[in-house]
Amino acid sequence: MMQLYTKTQIKPFNQRISHDSSILSLGSCFADNMAKRLNSLKFDVVSSPTGILFNPESIALAIERFAAYSNGDSNALPQRNELHYDNGCWFHYDFHSAFSNSDPDKALTQMQEAVKLGAEALKRADTVIITFGSALIYRYNENQQVVANCHKQPQRLFTRELLDAEAISQRYLKLCLNSLADKRVIFTVSPIRHLSDGLEINSLSKATLRVAIDKIAQHADNVTYFPAFEIMNDELRDYRFYADDMIHPTPLAVNYIWERFADAAFSDDTIKLISRIEQIATDMAHRPFNPEGEPYKTFCAKILTRIATLEKEYPQLDFNEEKTHFSKYL
């Protein structure tokens, strides 16, 4: 039979992810999307507590902040003098704009709670998923600190720089031997292209990230690479797998990448459990023709019985939302 596309070969992970795992996902919006999928399937996952992070340095700084607070260092919490003010909002260059607020105390409280959440998630996690989006960083000229978000401030305030693959790998090898030493770390490179700097810079950036991860994996036994970037660019190279902006993957492409991830990351038992959870989600999304009728009440009762069976088998799973939904029709 003719082979009409190049398929990325993925080795099954040495350590599989299960519903007993505790996961922290950090990085680009691709990492956030994958974490949402895991969360919908009842995995214990915390995603990007301080907001989406694109570059390796900002992700590393977030991990260090979480680890420091987890170890009792209260100075790891953002302080009032670290906030900046513009256009009616107080913000922090290490945090997403969602944490900005017209009230500095509210902004600071939200940021501090995010760090506490991240510290607790890092402490509990046995699995950390890190997705690099870009090797480009922006330094705030006033103190030369790398920023996670420029908050639409004037470009003259920052200096752009391309990180070096060796510097990235050395930075993360230290993390993998310290704060992440007892975790399995899954690295990915986001398949989403950053075109604001042009295709040439985007290619150079992605190549830098890929080389850096390979160097990390060669020297850290707890590191695994998942080839989301290669799947998107080789298996799904046709533009029909891109959204209208020609940058982001379509839902079909995301689903395909998810399936390849599931094949590598989950055991057969976990995949079977996922199928049972997905069926309940499908049933929940169903809109009945007559919700007051006896047939639908019987249907809901059967679903509640299936949920009860799952809860007995997997007491760590939370089905309260589903139980509330189906119970209201009885």
Image (spheres, rainbow, N blue to C red):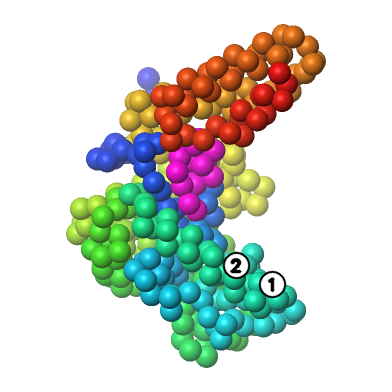
| Front position in the image: 287 or 298 | 298
Q: Is residue 293 above or below residue 246?
A: above
Disc 2 and disc 1 in contact, CB within 8 angstroms: yes
Query: What SS does tag 1 mark?
Result: loop
x and y percent of residue 55 in the render? 45, 66
Q: Is residue 278 left or right of residue 123?
A: right
| Front position in the image: 96 or 156 | 96
Kind of residue sitting beneath label 2:
Gln
Name the residue rendered at 65%, 30% in the picture: 324
Name the residue rendered at 36%, 57% in the picture: 123
**Which residue is at the far top?**
295
Kind of residue sitting beneath label 1:
Asn
Q: Which residues are magenta?
A: 34-47
Question: Where on the picture, by quarter, is residue 164?
Answer: bottom left
x and y percent of residue 233 in the render? 46, 46
Q: Earlier in the sequence, mark 2 or mark 1?
A: 1
The residue tagged 2 is: 110
